[in-house]
Amino acid sequence: MLANILSGAVLGIEAYPVTVEVDLAYGMMVFNTVGLPGNAVCESRTRVKTALKNSGYDFPNKHITINLAPANIRKEGTVFDLPIALGILAADGQIPESSVKNTLFAGELSLDGSIHPFRGVLPLAACARENGLGRVMVPAENASEAAVVEGIDVIGVRSLHEAVSYLRGETKIDRAQPIVFEEENEESSLDMRDVHGQPIARRALEIAAAGGHNLLFIGPPGAGKTMLARRLPTIVPPMTFAERLESSVIASIAGLLRADQPLMLHRPFRAPHHNLSDVALIGGGPLSRPGEVSLAHNGVLFLDELPEFKRCALESLRQPLEDGEVVIARAQATLTYPSRFMLVAAMNPCPCGYFGHPRVACNCTSQMVQNYRNRISGPLFDRIDLQIPVDPSFKTDRDQEDTPEDSATIRKRVIAARALQTQRLANTTAHCNAQMTPALIHEFCTLDASSARLLDNALDRYGLSARAHDRILRVARTIADLDGEPQIAMNHLAEAIQYRQLDREVRS
Ligand SMILES: Nc1ncnc2c1ncn2[C@@H]1O[C@H](COP(=O)(O)OP(=O)(O)OP(=O)(O)O)[C@@H](O)[C@H]1O
Ligand SMILES: [Mg+2]
Ligand SMILES: [Zn+2]
């Protein structure tokens, strides 16, 4: 009397299948769980037994052994309750064994037999499909989230009773419908129309949005740095389906997906406060949660007042910025969370804020200015593609000026530029220019002889690193894409170089 029933567990953002083997033998009544169960899994025995009894099923008076395979990975969480309960009923002949085939089961039971939703159903559903299964049975409240994965039937159940009646063929449950995507129409009260002047900052924001590049605004108080950065979500291109799924899996694990919106439609825009902990920023901790850098995956991480962040927190950004993923070492396993985000940051040039201001005098000593800027290390600066001074150029006489362009108009150009990238980078792991690997840069960012000379000279003159070289080429590619040009020309490259000069100035 052995039954095998499939479930799954999540490690990092990846799910792997777990086979719940249930063996019933004659003998003294015991109930054992083996296969590296965590505490919650051990406690599942009590919940399963009580839920079965309270739902009116016979709890077999036998020697019950549950094995969770593969046995070498520790299993955490409560999602094995449902497969264990169903496995016992199948092994005992109370439900037909054929009815549990080809299906992944996951769900937490409460003592009265009802089934609770859990975090991370999306990766489990994706895992079921990857393993060739045709169906998943999950808590009803998680069903629309799981149904986002195409090509599998999702059965949502509210109670053990409902699950059993369905498997016995006594009741029908319609498979959960994947949600219909509406062309996004996010109501935002913010618009680029509100930002007067600032042509360079506006241009930089457009380039950043088009290619996914990192951006730093530096300027005096009230110049409009925060205002500009907060409007970035109004001009970024929509996410592709692959990007939506990637970001939604992370949000699903963090428990941030709403039941009525199981697939993220908008790029994440994360703006954490500067007093957040390193773990909250990078991820990890006792629960191995994804941090802000991963929650911002495929979107924006906005760090306002950059020098106010703890130096060690900023330093810990270096690795995810470079590799696009965070590696968290744990006793049991090493977890990898993706973290390909755009870093957008804002800072004042000095503690008082007015260093270099044309009209207001700065009252900081040069040592104070230096110390302030040194809070942001050279390697972090090096990872910022667009380093943009924001002037305090505000004019009251706005009638003289044309009405500023609105976000919708800018976004059209951004979408066109991104479409070229999507086409060019199809069949690669990169979604946009900022994510191009050195090999892709070599393939897609070729320069003619005079442009190559220009770049060499700039590297020499400003003492730029090899990393800066690659980053300049990625930005130049985006500027050419905004121009609709298949080849990077001298003017594209020169513009890209110009955005790298701030770190030389402020650090000299
Ligand atoms: N270019 C602009 N066009 C229209 N309004 C602006 C502009 N720049 C600034 N403002 C106005 O000034 C306010 C302050 O701007 P913002 O908060 O973005 O400044 P900041 O550069 O972030 O300053 P701080 O360094 O103090 O954080 C804005 O809310 C807006 O009302
Ligand atoms: Mg600000
Ligand atoms: Zn100052």
Image (tube, rainbow, N blue to C red):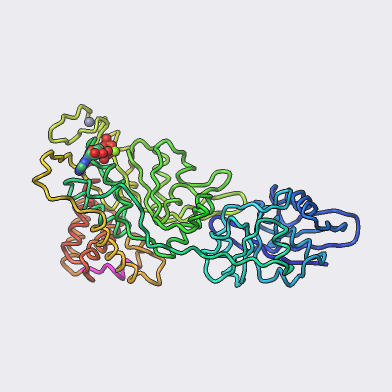
Horizontal and vertical percent for residue 102? 66, 71
Left or right position of 122 against 70 = left
Which residue is situated farthest in the right direction here?
Answer: 27
Residue at (53%, 57%) from the top-left corner? 13
Horizontal and vertical percent for residue 151? 54, 71
Which image quarter is the N terminus in? bottom right
433 within the magenta span: no
Q: Nearer the viewer, residue 177 or 145?
A: 177
Q: Which secondary structure class fits the magenta region best?
A: helix
Horizontal and vertical percent for residue 16? 61, 62
Residue at (16%, 29%) from the top-left corner? 361
444 within the magenta span: yes
Q: Tell me if residue 148 can be seen.
A: yes
Which residue is situated farthest in the front direction here?
Answer: 171
Q: Tell me if residue 348 can be seen.
A: no
**What residue span does the magenta drawing correspond to?**
440-447
User: From what the image shows, is residue 188 above or below residue 493?
Assistant: above
Residue at (68%, 65%) from the top-left corner? 6
Q: Nearer the viewer, residue 99 or 453?
A: 99
Left or right position of 21 against 464 = right
User: From what the image shows, is residue 142 above or below residue 488?
Assistant: above
**Quadrant of the rendered image containing residue 411:** bottom left
Which image quarter is the C terminus in? top left
Which residue is situated farthest in the left direction here?
Answer: 400
